[in-house]
Image (tube, helix red, strand yellow):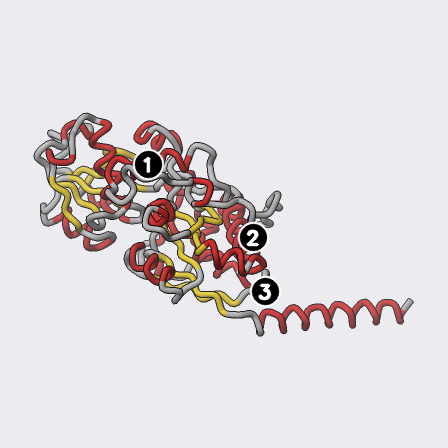
Amino acid sequence: MRSLRQIAVVSSVAFALAAASAAAHAEKITIMVGGATKIIYLPAKLTEQLGYFKDEGLDVDVESQPAGVDAENELIAGAVQGVVGFYDHTIDLQSKGKEIETVVVFGQVPGEVEMVTSAASATVKTMADVKGKTLGVTGLGSSTSFLTQYLAQRAGVSANQFTMLPVGADNSFIAAVKQGRIDLGMTTEPTVSRLLQTGDAKVLVDMRTVEGTRAALGGTYPASSFYVQRAWAQAHKDEATKLAHAFSRTLNFIATHSAEEIAEKMPKDYYGNNKDLYVGALKASMPMFTKDGRMPADGPQTVLNVLSAFNPSVKGKHIDLAKTYSNDYLPAATATASK
């Protein structure tokens, strides 16, 4: 009996050493995030913090770029293997002859909020009131600019009846509000909570929930996601599958843990000296995340509708939506994450 136990111990040690060796010799995978501290992209850093990449035997380096378009360019150049950004980039790039596919959907909705400054809130009650106003977006040609124009169009206001001003995100967005350079603007958490806390702006259109997004856009709008070049995924199916499994596990963790528990796992510089605000922003954002990384059935068409209306690269083009995403790399079922 003792010899059997000894054999079992030796075998388990050997297995652990083999797993450690495999991880040590794994090819480094670099993932670029279009603004890592944004809560819409939370699963990227959280997966690293939870150790799920290492559990899969992967050597992953998570880096951050302030804008999604910069991360996209790094992917196309082959400088990084994957990007965490908005799903709509896969549609935009297909129209330009690039084959990119989302393999994990983080957010089934944009997580974006159209905020109206307190000064303008007396006259702006809905998007139908934005005529003659200046609306802040992260950048011209960005996802926020297309969404802004689409929201206005659905309210009967054409793009030539208001001005869009690129003001970036986070602190630069807040500065634009405080300085009165914009009347409204589209941003995400935790910026939304910061502006609500100071009283500088109010929520006009809330796309942090499925209900709010369907009311605003007519369907779910898959946004934050993990995407790669299709050729890379096909040539590195094992790595793509392991990455998808790690992210799926994180999404399940988010679904089964409180905002306080999730915040505990994040680096301190993500919430600074105001952890309570960060927790509050997390609570407001958690409904946006998928539980397993799968693409919502009505999502791709809703995104295409928005881009076809205002993105000159996509308008009038045939887009094969089936090539913009894949659920094939995800696990058949995600085991419940342990607390």
Task: Report whether residue 28 is seen.
Answer: yes
Disc 1 vs disc 3: which is toward the camera? 3
User: Which is nearer the N-term, disc 1 or disc 2?
Assistant: 1
Q: Element type at marker 1?
A: strand
How far apart are labels 3 and 2 at the CA level?
Answer: 12 Å
* Quadrant in the picture for residue 15: bottom right
SS at circle 3: loop
Task: Say which of 257 and 54 sits in front.
Answer: 54
In the displayed structure image, the side of residue 207 where residue 249 appears, left or right: right
Look at mark 1 in the image and give the residue it sits on: 207
Q: Is residue 284 above or below residue 44?
A: above
Q: Position of residue 272 (x, y in %)?
A: 32, 59
Residue ID for mark 3: 57
Asked whether 144 or 281 is in front, the reply is 144
Give the Cα distance between marks 1 and 2.
Answer: 27 Å
Disc 3 residue type? Gly
**Residue shown at 60% from the left, 49% from the top:** 338
